Image (spheres, helix red, strand yellow):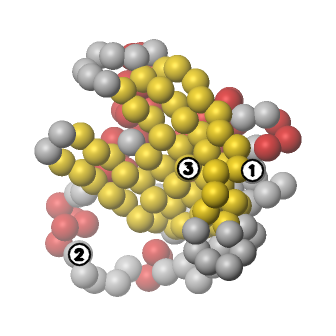
Amino acid sequence: MSFAATPSVGNRAWAIRLRRAGYAAAGTLEILQLRRQSDCNRYDIETKWQAPLSDAQYRSLTDRIAPFASVSSAELSELGASKGHDIVLDGTAIVLEIKSSGWEVTRRLNHYGHGGAELSAIFHKIVSEHAPDEEIPSADWRPR
C-alpha cells in the first residue's frame, strides 16, 4: 500500500509505504520525504524513516483505509461524469495505491476535494508519529 502527497506549491512531496510479506505477518512502514528536481518533474529522496508494524497495527491501518479503496454502486454509475465538488484548481494531489497478488486499486484525490482530507489525515498522523517534529508538514502537506 502506498500513499503520496504532492503539494502544488513548493518542491517537497511525501510518500508513505506500508508492506508486509504475508497474511498475519508483521509489516514495515516507510516514510519518504522527497525533493523535486528544479529542471524536471522528478523527485529525489531527501530523507527516509522506517519502522516495524505489528499485525494489529497493520490491520488497524488497512481497516481505516479500506473505504477509500472501494467504489460504491453510486460512484460506478457516475463514471465519466464530472462532479463539481471534486474540481480543485490548487492544492495537494493525493494518490493511494493498494496492490496484492492479482489485483490493484489506485485512487487519485485532492486534499481539498471530496474525501481527500479524511484520507490525508490518516497518513499525516503516521508521519507525525514517526518523523521528527521539525520535519512534520502542515495538515495539507506543505512545509511549515
Report which residue position mark 2 lands on. 78
Location of residue 139 in the rendering, given as x and y in whole percent from the top left corner: 70, 52
Location of residue 107 in the rendering, given as x and y in whole percent from the top left corner: 36, 60
Kindly state the secondary structure of the residue where label 2 is placed. loop
Q: Going 76% across and 44% down the picture, which residue do you hit? A: 136
Location of residue 14 in the rendering, given as x and y in whole percent from the top left corner: 61, 52
**In the rendered view of the protein, which quadrant contains the C terminus?**
bottom right
Name the amino acid, label 2.
Glu
Rounded to the nearest angstrom, the CA distance separating label 1 from label 2 is 34 Å
Name the amino acid, label 3.
Ala
Q: Going 55% across and 35% down the picture, which residue do you hit? A: 30
Report which residue position mark 3 lands on. 15
Q: Is residue 122 above or below residue 73?
A: above
Rounded to the nearest angstrom, the CA distance separating label 3 from label 2 is 29 Å
Nearest to N terminus: mark 1 or mark 3 = 3
Q: Depth-wise, is mark 1 or mark 3 nearer the camera?
A: 3
Kindly state the secondary structure of the residue where label 3 is placed. strand
Tell me if label 1 and label 3 are in contact, CB under 8 Å: no
Q: Going 33% across and 41% down the picture, which residue do you hit? A: 66
Nearest to N terminus: mark 1 or mark 2 = 2
Name the amino acid, label 1.
Pro
Horizontal side of 112 relative to 56 (left or right) equals right
Report which residue position mark 1 lands on. 137
Q: Is residue 81 above or below residue 56?
A: below
Q: Report crowding for label 2: few under 14, some 14 to 19, many 20 or more residues within 10 A (C-alpha).
A: few
Location of residue 108 in the rendering, given as x and y in whole percent from the top left corner: 41, 65
Q: Is residue 90 visible?
A: yes
Q: Is residue 116 visible?
A: no
Res. 96 mark: none
Tell me if label 1 and label 2 are in contact, CB under 8 Å: no
Kindly state the secondary structure of the residue where label 1 is placed. loop
